[in-house]
Image (cartoon, coloured by chain):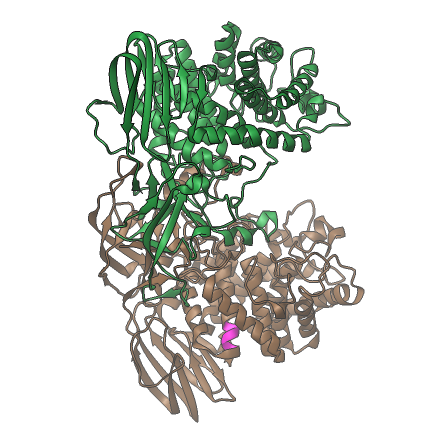
Chain colours: A brown, B green
Amino acid sequence: MQSVSLKQIKVTDGFLKTRLTANRNNTVYNVYDRFKETGRFDALKCVKEETKSHIFWDSDVAKWIEGACYMLYANEDKNLRALMDQVIDDMVNNQLENGYFNSYFQVYEPDAIFTRRNDHELYCAGHIFEAAVALKDYLNDDRLLNFASKYVDYIIDRFTVKKDTGFVTPGHQEIELALLRLYKLTNEEKYLNLAKFFIDNRGANDKEECSFYNQSHLPVRHQTTAVGHAVRALYLYTAMADMALTIKDVELENAVKTLFDDIVKSKLYVTGGTGSSYNGEKFGIDYNLNNLGAYNETCAAIALCYFADKLMQLYGDAKYGDIIEKVIYNAFMSGVSIDGNSYFYVNPLEVKKDRVEYESTLPNWAKDKHPLLKRVKVFDCSCCPPNVVRFTEEIPSYAVYYDEDLSTITVSQYLSEEVYTPLASVNIDSNFPYDGKVKISVNSYGKDIKLKLRKPSWCKVNFYNEENGYLVFEGVFDDAEIELDFKMSFYEIYANPTVLEDFGKVCFNYGPLVLCAEGTDNDFNILSVKIPKKAKIKGEVLYGDPYVVNANLKVLYYPKTEKLYDVKPPKKIEKTLKLIPYFAWANRDENDMAVWFTKC
Amino acid sequence: MQSVSLKQIKVTDGFLKTRLTANRNNTVYNVYDRFKETGRFDALKCVKEETKSHIFWDSDVAKWIEGACYMLYANEDKNLRALMDQVIDDMVNNQLENGYFNSYFQVYEPDAIFTRRNDHELYCAGHIFEAAVALKDYLNDDRLLNFASKYVDYIIDRFTVKKDTGFVTPGHQEIELALLRLYKLTNEEKYLNLAKFFIDNRGANDKEECSFYNQSHLPVRHQTTAVGHAVRALYLYTAMADMALTIKDVELENAVKTLFDDIVKSKLYVTGGTGSSYNGEKFGIDYNLNNLGAYNETCAAIALCYFADKLMQLYGDAKYGDIIEKVIYNAFMSGVSIDGNSYFYVNPLEVKKDRVEYESTLPNWAKDKHPLLKRVKVFDCSCCPPNVVRFTEEIPSYAVYYDEDLSTITVSQYLSEEVYTPLASVNIDSNFPYDGKVKISVNSYGKDIKLKLRKPSWCKVNFYNEENGYLVFEGVFDDAEIELDFKMSFYEIYANPTVLEDFGKVCFNYGPLVLCAEGTDNDFNILSVKIPKKAKIKGEVLYGDPYVVNANLKVLYYPKTEKLYDVKPPKKIEKTLKLIPYFAWANRDENDMAVWFTKC
């Protein structure tokens, strides 16, 4: 199956449109301003006395450029284009003669170039290459593509010819998937070969000790369990899946299928977040899904979508669309404020405001790690915000896939948009994630095609034409309109009893949305609440404002008692608990939040 | 009220006797051997080229000496005495002319003496002073007392006359309580005055920034909430309480009463452990009592007993005896293996073996903090093992207190021992913590006295002569024998609903013992278990072996399911859960353990 270029998609309405508007009006400018203030753009001028830099700053800038390219294709914005042009010029003008570029290393540690595996040089290069692909593909601008070509030549020479580098494969993966994008755009074999070099040598011919942490403990084709740093892992798996697509590598195909299933079976938060641990931003052991201490980096949510999208192209299985849906409306959307101006790096499933405040009074070395209660405009390690810029723009591409060989159109996400493929044009109209009704009109240009519409995993309606998670229609579609109702409703989810942090608890959902309770809406301790056996959620769901999923249910609240311990069970009183979409938390004040609640 | 010197106590039988036997036969020698191996004793020779040392090693050694003194008073052991004599000689022979001694600073950083507040010099001095008191008091040996006197003169000169030190009060408290012990032994005012200097200036006239972390955020008399490093806090509070006893300081009296109540009300684990947080070994915020991540240093359990003992002497309230009982049989005893040869520093209330094993595969910086699953013979920071040596010997002194003014004898702990006080002799015979029956015979030497026996807080029997937590008897006791039965039974405890980690859970107890389940005894995941509404524990309780509290109850076990999340609740099957005393956990293999269980 193939995905559709953003050039062939027009977002028409709906929730996604509101997110794109926030992204284009606010996020891209806010990230620019903060990066300008912190010196990330000036760093590209590479003037030792006047600029500072950091080993991974170039990657921040590159993601911003990539996002700007998609936006500028969709809507001209002279102001944004001027800013972007200057950034690109600074980058291009300071590329070294030999092709190398890193605004930190070439200025501050030229002797250390490609000596330290975990210092993100190839990661930065990868992000610049992705920006180069976007710039050429969407704006027909060659500047960064030429830059990338020269840079790749240098990398090839150092890593594969001279072999004089301190390491063989990158400590922070990303370049592999970028090289494959370069290959697909240009058809130049050197990109494919270098991607293959990094993928094949990883865990097989590395110089340093094998490490679970950055997925070099085993040759990648033999890896079966997601381990270590979540973002590195997911970028690697994305590249492996894309390589499998590109060169029909069965071992890679099997490896990525196994790795994805492993994540979904034992390492995925109900929100679609991954990477449960603060220490090393890593996947925890199976079923270790702490709510209060959840890490769930926003970049990991994005990377999981990239990975699932490649698997969708490989296998076309509805489960990949289910995960993309879960991630977009929950784990990813939690990472950015409603107005687009502030961001979470860490996306917990529970917070206790008093604990965060207490820790803030202590010296750093005595602090327990706690998430922020409020999104911020920039981080020191600010990988997530520019990833929001580019990924928000990429979401429209997850709606429709096509397979020319099988004459099949697959609708995976119900986003209101028009999509043009060589096989058919598809017009989707939906109020997801607020309403299960969708209208889809298809024109197959007079040809006989198969149309597959993903039935969301939460949908309880039985359809006559279900087949492996899809509703299947066949025929010639002449602007034929299909109207469906997947019927969104409130429902409870239980975790596997092996997830001890969720044992005896339930999580409330509405269609694709995970719900949470915030202290803001509830005048009692939301963490001292039990859900009655037969809880009935009443709610109103309107379209337009993310707060409008207001679910209410009667719960048993256990007020604070006098004693710390007692042989008598604590007393309860009835209260009404109000729930809102998880992604909308922390948009008002700093308060407690919880997703899982103890069930009677 | 006064406590009784160990010289006036003879332990006759019972649980305590088994612990003393392990301490004298194994612990004292194991700690010696490990400290010998790691160079802690050689360090005292202070030879730069041949020995190494560490800023806090002298304190480890001093605690070992103190414990050895108590043992040698109780039972001569020529081997132990010879070892101890050598250690003391090395210490005394290398004391500097000016009185200073620290085997690290005087050898490696003489210029840094008393410049860095958090480098434990006064903490080490304090422990040596405590050893000096024990050596003089129990073995009538002046060597360390002379050493201490000279050292204190030097400290007085530097801190209170020259005032040329880098700090005013110690970063790690302990010397304050040691100086008060020196004062009580010798009646020399200089010890009292220096203790007063450190207590009065703390948080009031410190040079550096105020710090919650080491309890110098406020003058100590104004402190109302236990904060920061738990052991530092509790040693300070012990000294404050002892000072209050010594000089009748009402402000201090009120402060320590308030601080103790604060701990018991919101910061005490059900085992009597304190200091919930790994980061900074510190008290967490109120009601933050994580089970899996509990820190609960063994030294904190010991220090809480020291503190409660002083409060017992100040106020005589039964609640202090209740806490000492709780700590001794649970939080403290968990810190040492049944055979006395290995130790925990961290005493969690829940462990997941697979998580600990998983983290051990990762580099240090990417590890989540997890407790050990197995006690070890020594730590790099090995404060707890020698604290076990001395504290085990001190436990007999918590049984009986006397008040000559009020002609009152108070029996606080039911330990099988003979206690001689100026008011009466008391002979206690009990099988605590396995049986609630106690026999107490008292001889008041023909005088009319009041005899108060603490009614344990878990006891449900109603007695005719109860008064504020005590059973009160009056009269002339002529070897009169009182037989009582506090009737130990199994019971459930609930935590305050504000303790979110225990919300919806219960903890099982038997008399003073907290019970736990271990994977070793249960062939299913003990963390995926729910306790039925009307759970009935059946058990057998025999005296002699710590494993013999075998409690069994029918529980609902929820096996691992296929899916990670499901709209259907997981299925349950009936199982029998076996419980053992918490202190006895991890004495067989490495396995899961839990204290709190989800209640239906």
Quadrant in which the N terminus of chain B is drawn: top left
Q: For the magenta stretch, what is the residue range? A: A309-313
Is residue B297 visible from the viewing direction of this image?
Answer: yes
Q: Residue A18 placed where, x, y %? A: 38, 65
Q: Which residue is drawn at 66% across and 70% down?
A: A195
Q: Residue at x 72, y 53 (%)?
A: A106
Left or right for A105, reference B522: right
* Front position in the image: B558 or B589: B589
* Front position in the image: B197 or B433: B433
Is residue B215 visible from the viewing direction of this image?
Answer: no
Please identify the quarter of the rendering in which residue B568 is found: bottom left
Q: In this view, does B41 lie above or below A549?
A: above
Reply yes or no: does residue A303 show up in magenta. Answer: no
* Front position in the image: B535 or B180: B535
Q: Residue A523 placed where, x, y %? A: 25, 46
Left or right for A148, reference B195: right
Q: Residue B306 placed where, x, y %? A: 44, 23
Please identify the quarter of the rendering in which residue A20 is found: bottom left
State the predominant SS element of the stretch in magenta. Answer: helix
Left or right for B575, reference A281: left
Reply yes or no: does residue A311 show up in magenta. Answer: yes
Tally of numbered discs: 0
Q: Residue A505 placed where, x, y %? A: 33, 56
Left or right for B240, reference A206: left
